Image (cartoon, coloured by chain):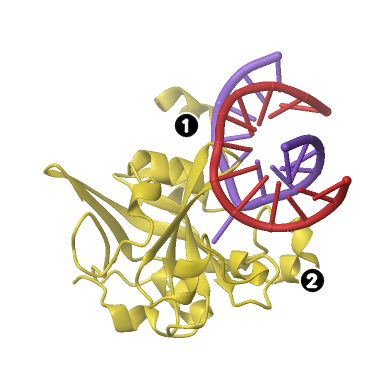
Chain colours: A yellow, B purple, C red
Amino acid sequence: MIIPRDYFDRPTLDVARSLVGKYLVREQGGRLIAGRIIEVEAYVGTEDKACHASKGRTARTDVLFGPPGHAYVYLCYGMYEMLNVVTEQEGFPAAILLRAVECDGRLIDGPGRLTRAFDIDRRLNRCDLTLGQSLWFEDRGEAVPPGWLKTHPRIGVDYAGEWAHKPWRFRLTTEASKPGRPITKRALSRK
DNA sequence: TATTTGATTCTT
DNA sequence: AGAATCAAATAT
């Protein structure tokens, strides 16, 4: 089921939590690629100093103030495209950064790697992500086991003072990163 | 108009 | 620890 607009028209932290375990799907020229969402970060309102909207409504941040369910894609560090989905009602700027997905058993870990793997760039900025065209989210009915969703501080936002400490990063514990599975010689030689 | 700075990743 | 690389924000 394609995730509809009203799903994103809710408190951003709620959306972020529930988005983990859902799927990000990319379609272009007949090629379809889908990844289970493993890690996201929430950016909430003008008060949140880590949120780009804290600088006010500019040409760049305008989309954050718009209706939910649209893409906010921007260039970071001159080389990496960052994919976000806008949340909450029109007029309230907030979004969720997609940081990691699991694709065919492979972990694509890092927002820049994710957009590269899915061939996402600024051409998709302001795109409607609820139409099932080019890029959308799917609920495939896979429940996240209780206790497997962990919160952490957001990454790379030290400049945001107090706001940098908020546990607004959400990550799903995966088989690969599960504790209690020490690497053995046998595992290493297995390949 | 000039300089600084990132919601990062890769190499040394 | 530093480079790559550039648009947006900030300083001048």
Q: Quarter of the image containing the C terminus of chain A?
A: top left
Tag 2: residue type?
Answer: Glu
B1 with respect to A10 (left or right): right
Q: Which residue is mark 1?
A: A187
- Which chain letter goes with mark 1? A
Q: Are marks 2 and 1 in contact (CB under 8 Å)?
A: no
Q: Nearer the viewer, residue A151 or A125?
A: A125
Q: Is residue A90 visible?
A: yes
Q: Secondary structure at mark 2?
A: helix
- Which of the 4 image quarters holds residue A190? top left
Q: Is residue A148 visible?
A: no
Residue at 65% from the left image edge and 55% from the top image edge = A155
Mark 2 surroundings within 10 Å by alpha-carbon count, few (fewer than 14), some (14 through 19), many (20 or more): few
Q: Are marks 2 and 1 on the same chain?
A: yes
Q: Which residue is mark 2?
A: A162
* Image location (x, y in percent) of residue A4: 26, 77
Q: Nearer the viewer, residue A22 or A157?
A: A157
